[in-house]
Image (spheres, rainbow, N blue to C red):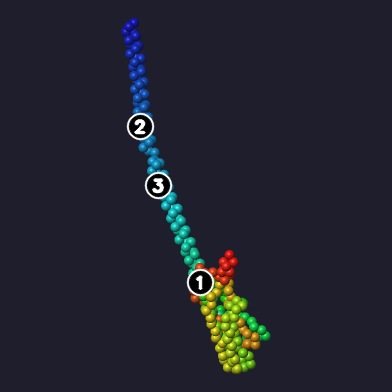
Amino acid sequence: MRVSVILLWFCLSSVQLQRADDQLIMGDVQLLHNSHVERSKPDQTNVQPDVWTELRDMVVEQRELLKFYQNQIEKLKKENTDRVAFSFASGLNGNHGPLPKDSILVFRKQITNIGNAFSKITGVFTAPLRGVYYFRFNVLGSSRSHRLAVCLFKNKEKILDVAEYPKGQYEYAVGGATLLLQKGDQVYVLLRSNSQISDNSDNHCNFSGFLLFEMVNAFSAEEKDELVQR
């Protein structure tokens, strides 16, 4: 009886020891697995800052590139605006006038029109920007009975008046002026009443002008009046 009890106790102890060993082995396997998983996971603390750094650098680069292109566009706009020059001939093949009243002399034959500020329909130059411009005109006459008289006007202000009396001989009326113009100001040549001009394909009658330099950071007459009223 005592031997049987001893054998039973020995068997139970062996089973418990086996279970304990199995648990230890499973624990070791789980530890190894967890260790492998941890080593295989990417280091989020290292990867995430690198991604944000790259994105930030890309944004900065795109902003600088956009600013560069905007500056180039503004530069091109300014260059195109600053270039103003025109030269037109009358386009006549014979005489023009005399007329019963003063009228704008229309020069229809285009030689140059950079900036498209001169209209061959109306004969009027319209300043595209505030600046200092130079204008010059030549007109030819050969009438025996009519004068050759023209004026240069800025808006409704007469700048100069030139008159010749050809008496059957070829005579030129020539004039020029340097003018400070506001944007939108108009300049034109006026043919006086009872005057006659002559021209042909040699372009004896012509009107030219160009921008000398732009005037910036200055107030127009209207702006000055507004500031005074304030």
Q: Which residue has dot 2 on it?
A: 32
Q: CA distance from mark 2 to mark 3?
A: 30 Å
Q: CA distance from mark 1 to mark 3?
A: 51 Å
The 10 Å Cα crowd at callout 2, few under 14, some 14 to 19, many 20 or more, is few
Say which amino acid is labelled 1: Met
Eye-nearest disc, 2 or 3: 3
Residue under the image location 36 percent in, 30 percent down: 31
The 10 Å Cα crowd at callout 3, few under 14, some 14 to 19, many 20 or more, is few
Eye-nearest disc, 1 or 3: 1
Q: Nearer the viewer, residue 86 or 157?
A: 157
Query: Could you tell me residue 110's position as x and y percent?
Result: 56, 79
Quarter occupied by the C terminus: bottom right
Query: Is tag 1's residue or tag 3's residue first in the polypeptide sequence?
Result: 3
Q: Which residue has dot 3 on it?
A: 50
Q: Name the element at disc 2.
A: helix
Residue under the image location 46 percent in, 59 percent down: 67
Query: Could you tell me residue 161's position as x and y percent?
Result: 58, 84
The 10 Å Cα crowd at callout 1, few under 14, some 14 to 19, many 20 or more, is some
Residue under the image location 36 percent in, 24 percent down: 23
Say which amino acid is labelled 2: Leu
Per the rendering, the mark at residue 215 is 1
